[in-house]
């Protein structure tokens, strides 16, 4: 199976090692396609060279009108996994599938307050808000475009902050000593270092990435629209 990841920047990606562990000898290659927005190829390039493609920031919304997706994925408005089957291209969103499993579990385990705060206004933040509302979770959303410097806000009312901002944002605000900071980014040493000597629990996005990969493999093995 020939797979790849499209995004920018993605040199930090741990997807190659995850898929190698999950697929073993079934994985022929996993290629990182790091293109800026001015040079990204069209889908025919990937269709000729791959069986499946993962898509990350900033391209999750780019190809959705060019591929076949379910009504639910249309409502989400973003895709992160493509399957190339002959002339047909099917798309899905394994972010949503993974978060449906992981979000309620994390909130139940680490949130001792009435309110969970989600940072960001991109695809992942919107998914957390959507899925959270479906599970009856109480979420408050802060984003840099609407709230300015997120490090200047008051987080004293929450025990769980979920960071869905891009990797360039480093959270430095004060949290309660028993709080948890769930960072959807992973391999972010600058962010991890801030919490290293504190009581605050730091969770990175690796478990979410693993679940996304498991859902992607299921989709490639049985490429149907749910």
Image (spheres, rainbow, N blue to C red):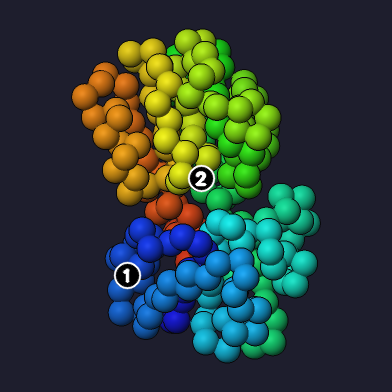
- Between 181 and 132, the residue placed more toward the observer is 181
Q: CA distance from mark 1 to mark 2?
A: 26 Å
Question: Circle 1 sits on which residue?
Answer: 20
Q: Position of residue 146 (x, y in %)?
A: 68, 30
- Up the image or down, 162 lies above or below 157; here it is below
Between circles 1 and 2, the one closer to the viewer is: 2
Which labelled disc corresponds to residue 166? 2
> Residue 88 — which label?
none
Would residue 220 be visible to someone looking at this image?
Answer: no
| Residue 55 appears left or right of 89 | left
Q: Position of residue 151 (x, y in %)?
A: 48, 24
- Residue 18 relative to residue 114: left or right: left
Label 1 crowding class (10 Å Cα cut-off): few <14, some 14-19, many 20+? some
**Residue 137 x/y as whole percent:** 61, 24
> 203 or 153, which is in the foreground?
153
Foreground: 48 or 168? Answer: 168
Residue 102 image position (x, y, % from top left): 48, 39
Which of the two labelled residues, at mark 1 and mark 2, occupies the earlier sequence position? 1
């Amino acid at each position: 199976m020939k797979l790849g990841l499209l995004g920018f920047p993605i040199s930090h990606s741990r997807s190659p090692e995850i898929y190698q562990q999950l697929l073993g000898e079934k994985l022929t290659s996993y290629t990182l396609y790091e293109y800026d927005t001015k040079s990204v190829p069209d889908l025919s390039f990937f269709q000729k060279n791959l069986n499946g493609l993962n898509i990350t920031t900033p391209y999750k919304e780019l190809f959705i009108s060019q591929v076949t997706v379910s009504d639910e994925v249309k409502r989400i408005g973003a895709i992160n996994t493509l399957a190339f089957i002959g002339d047909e291209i099917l798309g899905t969103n394994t972010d949503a599938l993974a978060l449906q499993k992981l979000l309620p579990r994390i909130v139940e385990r680490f949130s001792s307050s009435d309110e969970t705060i989600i940072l960001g206004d991109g695809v992942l933040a919107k998914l957390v808000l959507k899925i959270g509302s479906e599970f009856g979770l109480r979420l408050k959303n802060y984003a840099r475009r609407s709230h300015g410097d997120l490090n200047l806000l008051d987080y004293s009312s929450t025990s769980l902050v979920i960071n869905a901002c891009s990797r360039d944002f480093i959270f430095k605000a004060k949290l309660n000593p028993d709080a948890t900071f769930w960072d959807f980014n992973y391999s972010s040493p600058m962010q991890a270092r801030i919490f290293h000597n504190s009581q605050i629990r730091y969770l990175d996005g690796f478990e979410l990435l693993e679940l996304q990969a498991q859902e992607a493999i299921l989709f490639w093995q049985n490429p149907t629209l749910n």
